[in-house]
Amino acid sequence: MDFRSAVLDPSTGLALLGIFGALWVALGIWWGKKAKDLEGFLLAGRNVGLALGSATAMATWVTSNTVMLAPKFALQMGVWGMLAYSTAAFGLTLFAPLAFRIRRLMPAAFTSGDFVRLRYGRAAWVVFLAISLTYSMAWLVSMGMAGGKFLQALSGMPYLWGMTAILGVCTLYTLFGGLYAVIGTDFIQSVVILIGVVVVGVVVLNGVDMHHFYAALHDDHPALLKTFMPVALLSLFNNMFFGFGEIFHNNVWWSRAFAMREGVAPRAFALSGLFWLPIPVAAGFLGLCAAPLGINVPDPDMVGPLVASRVLGAAGSVVVFLVLFCSLASSVDSLLAATSDLLLEDVYRKMLNPGAGERVLRRASTWVVVGLGGLTWLLCAGDFGDLLQVLFLSGPLVGSAIWPVIAGLYWQRANRPGAVAAMLLGSAAGLWAYFAIGWFVASLIGTAVSMATVVVTTLAFPQPFDWNRLDERPAAS
Amino acid sequence: MFSKAFFNVLIVASLLLTAAAVVALLWLLVRDFLRERLW
């Protein structure tokens, strides 16, 4: 099938990009006026309510990877592929109690780096920042590339143009509005994503005869319906642990815990996990439709948009375009903001210029956001190929950070050398597994080695920790 | 092998839950707005 026969013409794609891009930037400028000081810009005044809090957590976790890779998982691993992707929702839900404790122990903190620095000291902080920044860049680059690819596939726009437009729009409104703009636009984007997924799913469901659909899968592609599929089962646990690692360590989620009003964060994260859970199955269903509908899939990354365009025609392409654009924007803006916070607070303020005042920091934050957007563009312009590889290469790194974070928050005797060793050994073992065995076990092995290291070192060399040291407010010190 | 019934329920339930999430989010938005607790 020539999928270009059913997709948007370039002028419609450009018009949609222009309209929604202008809308996000205008809203970013408008909401940005609420940011009266640096804390307002970085953490939206620490007063975000349940509706915006739940939506921003959910929308950030619905990346273009969710919409594009869930159908790819389904195409390659069948029902288990969709279910495997869904397990990433547990990371959001399980972050709820952590968010409660983070907010209580560190009411004045800005970043996840603050926690590691205060809890485990400088060496662990540096290792943690290296892991976190590597992962954040991998995530940003994978989404920038996805943006360029999908615009190219849907509207024929050159890869470089589409990728530049998406990164440019997100950088602009993050720059003007900080976390206010990110959280505000995330709400609208999350509603668009959810409605789009339902509309496409319902129309596809109406367009196929489920009896013949199942029979076609059963007869021609039985592997996709297998209940026992070792690779898919391994990928399920791998995905789950990757999700835990991503959420537990990354400043994207910590900054939201700091930004939400007291008592809101646990409920917001629990709800966002619930909202996110069905999306990979609803989107993944499209991947399973490819074979029974006789759609040729030249690029598995594009199977979701291909099926939607084929079944819904031009209207479907518009819906898919909007869903993917919102999925990308809601994650790129969050990553830009949270990673900029990490660079500004941990690298610039704490390492390079400890005496910097509010005005200097506000100006530096502008340069950090612009610089990060520019660096992401440069890496995306190189087009590294397979999306899954880019994303999962950072899996073992974040997996190795799960246990140092959990133990650091709840286990008073967890010690500094143990945390450093857990992150280094877990990352090394996970990377070895990635290349020696495969991506589907890398996070699993990285997490297991990290866990064993934390447990053994804590039991062998316990170091009691005073929780009050996590609160940096002047009155508390 | 996953049964036809399981497969159908899985797909339909995922779409219903996604639709429910939209309703819940909009309801929370209105509630927070009326209580002046959006931000």
Image: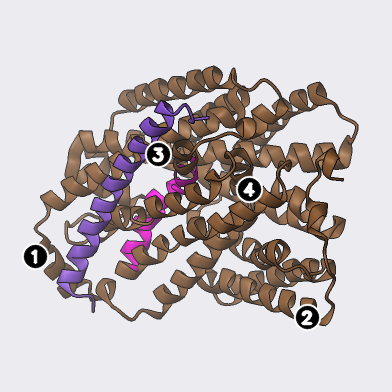
Chain colours: A brown, B purple
- Answer yes or no: are tags 3 and 2 on the same subunit: yes
Chain containing mark 2: A
Q: Where is residue A100 in the image (x, y as percent from the top left)?
A: 60, 52
* Residue for badge 1: A211
Chain containing mark 4: A
Extent of the magenta region: A56-77
Q: Looking at the image, which is closer to me, A72 or A462? A: A462
Could you tell me which quadrant the C terminus of chain A lies in?
top right
Q: Is residue A258 above or below residue A298?
A: above
Q: Is residue A9 left or right of residue A150?
A: left
Disc 2 marks a residue whose amino acid type is: Leu
Q: Is residue A470 above or below residue B34?
A: below
Residue contact between numbered discs 1 and 2, judged by CB atoms under 8 Å: no
Q: Position of residue A319 (x, y in %)?
A: 28, 36
Residue at position x 18%, y 49% from top?
Answer: A204
Crowding around mark 1 (Cα neighbors within 10 Å: few <14, some 14 to 19, many 20+) is: few
Crowding around mark 3 (Cα neighbors within 10 Å: few <14, some 14 to 19, many 20+) is: many
Q: Main secondary structure of the magenta part?
A: helix
Instruction: Name the N-terminal-most of marks 3 and 2.
Output: 3
Q: Looking at the image, which is closer to me, A113 or A384? A: A113
